[in-house]
Image (spheres, grey):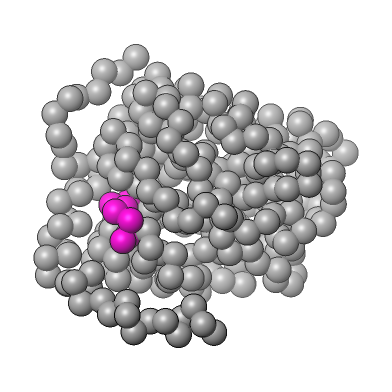
Amino acid sequence: MVTPSTTEQSTVRCGLIQCSNPLNDESRSVAEIQEAMVQKHLGYIEAAGKRGVQILCLQEIFNGPYFCPSQNPRWYEAAESVPGPTTERIAGIAKKYAMAVIVPVYEREMSGVFYNTAAVYDADGTYLGKYRKHHIPQVNPGFYEKFFFKPGNGGYPVFKTRYATIGVYICYDRHFPEGARCLGLNGAQIVFNPSATVAGLSQYLWKLEQPAHAAANGYFMGCINRVGTEGPWNIGKFYGTSYFVNPRGEITAQASEDNDELLVADLDLRMVDQVRSVWQFYRDRRPESYDQITQL
């Protein structure tokens, strides 16, 4: 058990885990495929704790494949309550190391109502709340998310962990600057974006949009993409390259394109104030002139 310091700190050690699916076998049950993915993550979660990671984020729907190319109702079986057995299981491990954790899973609110959700837990295992993915794509080929998810209805919350105030934005959300700005206005110092995206579609945007969000809003971002290919759909290669970007829009740490990996970086939160003292974007906003955004 790690005993956290009670003194205020400026530097927060954060971690991102990118993983490939170890069980590309549609003949196996949904529960078996999910458990294989959880087991693969456990070693990385323990490694994060031993390396002193204070805030850890897992990838989009971490405990399974990206099943949205299938349009197969059997994947509804992958959904569970949030908080629920999977999120509580991961939070229990993180608690041993006084590590806050973001756990993205497939959420079942009620029969027939499902969300793409990330649960957030503090360092002592306390459940802080959830973020539900707002923007749901329906893009050919292979991104048929409207078959599986309702759009999020919980706004753009931030979560005050022991170490920093954080926000979550999930995958396709990153193409929309409006929610990214809301997270900054709500007080986020670090925004995590767990994703599942393949080469050839949005890869040219991967290192463009999120550094722009970080610079425009003066916060850090931790951006995750899974790796490998997933059968039987084989919609393309998940190209990894998870990274951290600072409030100046500079990428400060990056993972590989191909390997399962824990990426760790120390984020100096003093930079948030330093950058915002130079670029007064929040002071100089003109929200009274933005009505057209919500009218069109």
**Rendered-image quadrant of the N terminus:** top left
Report the label total: 0
Residue drawn at x 62%, y 26% is 85
Q: Is residue 145 left or right of residue 4?
A: right
Residue drawn at x 58%, y 64% is 135
**Rendered-image quadrant of the C terminus:** bottom right
Residue 6, position as x, y percentages in the image: 17, 25
**Residue 203 within the segment the image draws in magenta:** no
Q: Determine the image quadrant of residue 69.
A: bottom right
Q: Which is nearer the eye, 278 or 245?
A: 278
**Residue 187 within the segment the image draws in magenta:** yes
Q: Determine the image quadrant of residue 109.
A: top right
Residue 88, position as x, y percentages in the image: 54, 26
* 98 relative to 72, above or below: above
Q: Determine the image quadrant of residue 122.
A: top left
Residue 189, position as x, y percentages in the image: 28, 52
Residue drawn at x 15%, y 34% is 8
Residue drawn at x 83%, y 34% is 29
Residue 76, position as x, y percentages in the image: 78, 44
Q: Is residue 188 left or right of residue 131?
A: left
Can residue 161 be seen here? The reply is yes
Q: Which is nearer the eye, 8 or 268?
A: 8
Q: Residue furthest top?
A: 1
Q: Which is nearer the eye, 37 or 215?
A: 215
> Over which residues does the magenta segment extend?
184-190
Can residue 46 be seen here? The reply is no
